[in-house]
Image (spheres, rainbow, N blue to C red):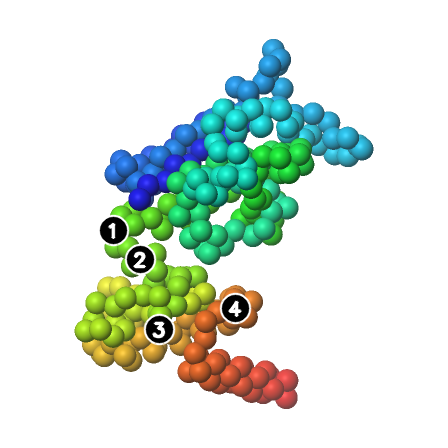
Amino acid sequence: MAIRFEIITIFPGFFAGIFEHGVIKRAIQGGLLGIGVHDLREFTHDRHRTVDDRPFGGGEGMVLKPEPMAEAVEHLRLAPKAERAAQGETVILLSAQGKKFSQATARELARAERVVLLCGRYEGVDERISELVADQELSIGDYVLSGGELAAAVVLDATMRLLPGVLGNDASSENESFGPADALLQSTAAGGLNSTHGAGGLLDYPHYTRPAEFRGLAVPEVLSSGNHEQIRRWRREQALKKTLRNRPDLLRDAELSAEDRSYLRALELRAGGAQSKDSV
């Protein structure tokens, strides 16, 4: 399975080094990933190669004009907007006003054959591009970037690493933060769960390697026990603890077992007791 990304930007040189390292480079060399970077200014028709103009209604900054962006997408000879999904194609406008990009969105995009990323700049892109050209708007977080290039790199990296064969071990993209639950995973350990544990929408559990002790901190004994069930349980509990501490919002939609819920209640009771002692 292969995927091709087309990136439309006013700064094509921005991506020169990004695709020459690590997993992205290996995916390109292995024929699993194709990338085309297109200069938006090549689709202008004036001597100044103008891509922006002042906003109607007044206001700060400049807005990317619709004509060059529309022509750049048309140059790629995609299917008509209404037929793109059936053809495995999608056009994404990277925008602070878009829906938040997530691991679930990356999994959806990994099933596409061709993804076009439109990089906004300045105050944004003329809204008619969103209405007439783009299939969806995506934001990589609740903050504003100076342009969509960084966001495009994030979307590309998060998506392509989910393709079979891109990572050294395909399970690496399953047993990690925001990954699927265990019910969706097949274990190689005698038909049952091994010591890894699918995140089911949670943050990943802590990882350790050698040395066994570092600056006074030892690796938890359970990880050296050889008992896969105890390791699995410990990892799940640590994932729940870290998610409760750093991203409690993820717990609302996470796939939780009765055992998970019981452990979370114990954590919350313990935290409540500690707060009560502090307030005395």
Q: Quadrant of residue 170?
A: bottom left
Q: Which residue is drawn at the image coordinates 52% and 68% (left, top)?
A: 253
Mark 1, residue position: 168
Under circle 2, the secondary element is: helix
Q: Which residue is drawn at the image coordinates 20% and 76% (left, top)?
A: 226
Tell me whether circle 2 and circle 3 mark residues in contact (CB < 8 Å).
Answer: no
Q: How many residues crowd mark 1 within 10 Å: few (<14), some (14–19), many (20+)?
A: few
Image quarter hosting the C terminus? bottom right
Q: Quadrant of residue 153?
A: top left
Sequence-wise, the earlier of marks 3 and 1 is 1
Under circle 1, the secondary element is: loop
Q: Quadrant of residue 160?
A: top left
Residue 214 is situated, as x and y percent measured from the top left of the image, at 29, 66
Q: How many residues crowd mark 4 within 10 Å: few (<14), some (14–19), many (20+)?
A: few
Q: Nearer the viewer, mark 2 or mark 3?
A: 2
Q: Give how far apart the Cα atoms at labels 4 and 2 are.
A: 22 Å
Say the numbered circle drawn on residue 253: 4
Residue 206 position (above or below residue 58): below
Mark 2, residue position: 172
Out of 153 and 170, give the one closest to the viewer: 170
Sequence-wise, the earlier of marks 2 and 3 is 2
Q: Amino acid at mark 4?
A: Asp
Q: Amino acid at mark 2?
A: Ser
Mark 3, residue position: 235
Sequence-wise, the earlier of marks 4 and 2 is 2
Is residue 48 shown to the viewer in this render? yes
